[in-house]
Amino acid sequence: FKLHKLLKTVPDENLTFVAAGCFERISDSGFRRFLSSQNEEFKRDAMKLWKNNFCGAVIKYIRIGGMSQLVDLGAQYIEKIKEVRRNLKTRSDTTHNLNSSHFKKLWKNEKGNMMIMTLLALIDGVSLSGNTNLNLNKLWPLTFSLVDLPTAEMQRATNMVLHGIAKGTENPSTTFWNKIVPMVYTDVKGSRHAIGNATIQFMIDTWIADQPAKRSLFGFKACNGESSCFYGLCSGTHHKKQGPNRETERPDELTILDATNGTNGFGTIPPRIVDFVLPYDTVLDLLHNAAEGIFSIVIRESLASESSQPRSDLFQNDRSVYLKFCDEVIVPSQFEVKNITNCSEKLLFFRFNFGLAALSNDSLKPEARIKICSLMLILNILYTKAPSSSNRFFAHLTGAARWALEQASPTYMGTKTHEFLCHLPYVIGKFGNIAPLSTVILHSSIRREIVIRSRQNPSQTLSNFMLATPSMREFEISWKNPIKHLEVEDQIA
């Protein structure tokens, strides 16, 4: 009502000028540029209307670009990148993500000294502490990760290149991302850079994001919408059932048609991102879909107090016994989890303490132990360099876990759990091991950076910090009692 009353008082000249900016979804800086040729009175009145407080939240995007950072990153690691290429071509390294069916398309088309660098674009929302619930500011960094690096280097904080940051009090809409996405591709595409005797070019090959950001990016319905799965035409609203593969049923132009018409899971606003990448060609976000999905549910229901209301009695057991077994698991200090405060620590706790304790906990039902051990094995192979020649390993284990959950209650199969258990084999077949590609959380990057610095002449400040944070100290093996003699049963013939 207040906005309607304000518009009644605005002259036609100002109204049509601001309307043109609204219809074109022009940025704040673009609007100011168009205003620069107008007189002062017109500028003042137009800006008053443009900046009114009745249109909802304003999302600002601070654009950095990132190309100079990418070139520096490429120059720093060029020899290691070439080594990765050599290992791929000689098939001495079959586990690197670039060897996957999706990523290999770029580097296999390289000719001469030209090298096409594969970029993964990431979006992850971060809440700013210290804000009230009524005016909670959030940041959405849009970063690039270079897939061409050795796997260990790929996961370091130094492999994060910032393109820009969105800031606001509400989640960015599809309309917002429709303005940002073409700009992101324009900043990266086309330019070539000479590094040594090689010429490199960067290409954004795919995207990864948490559920809210990814849904607004692709214009998808909410998690509880029918057919709102990125990878399949899966039925169900709050609880999903596995359906036909989206890539098989709606390939290429058919998915673009769905995006245009708002069908098969897409919303009413056509997303620009499908001009560059399709939803089934994106990486499943392990850190959020797993840690905030079924892994949290299983831990919570297995270790819950009697007052809680679980979805079923599948994980009912003697809580005190389970906690006792969890405490008895001995792991190197860098894998110890004292307090579960984030997604990474939740997955770490499940991989070791929680999963191993399930093997010894006789108060758990057999179905629950099958489910927990299946998830533990999936996590452990994702976080190792063990080769996997086929997807049968993941298909069998996700199938076992899904069977146990669906038999207990269909309410377990929310969107995050559904995507992880139903589509993980498909995504790994397309991209390889997704653990190194998962979204990066700021505190994880900070932890890695501190550990790296602590290895090389740490300052007194860093030494004091490590002393006060024993969980971050690297595990040291003691050689006080070397094994000098092997018994017969310990020898391998």
Image: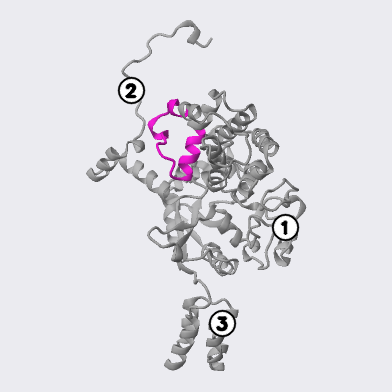
Question: Magenta residues, as a range?
Answer: 326-351
Which comes before the other along the chain, label 1 or label 2?
1
Give the residue type that dot 1 points to.
Asp
Screen quadrant of the N terminus: bottom right
Residue 2: image location, x then y, percent: 53, 83
Residue at x-position 47% and y-position 80%: 51
10 Å neighbourhood of mark 3: few (<14), some, or many (≥20)? few
Q: Disc 3 or 1, which lies upstream in sequence? A: 3
Mark 2 and mark 1 in contact (Cβ < 8 Å)?
no
> Residue 258 appears in which quarter of the rendering?
bottom right
State the SS at label 1: loop
The residue identified by callout 2 is: 478
Does the rendering let one see residue 44? yes
| 392 is higher (above) or lower (below) than 37 | above
| Residue bearing mark 3 | 1
Residue under label 1, please give it. Answer: 252
* Residue 146 coordinates in the image, percent (x, y): 50, 51
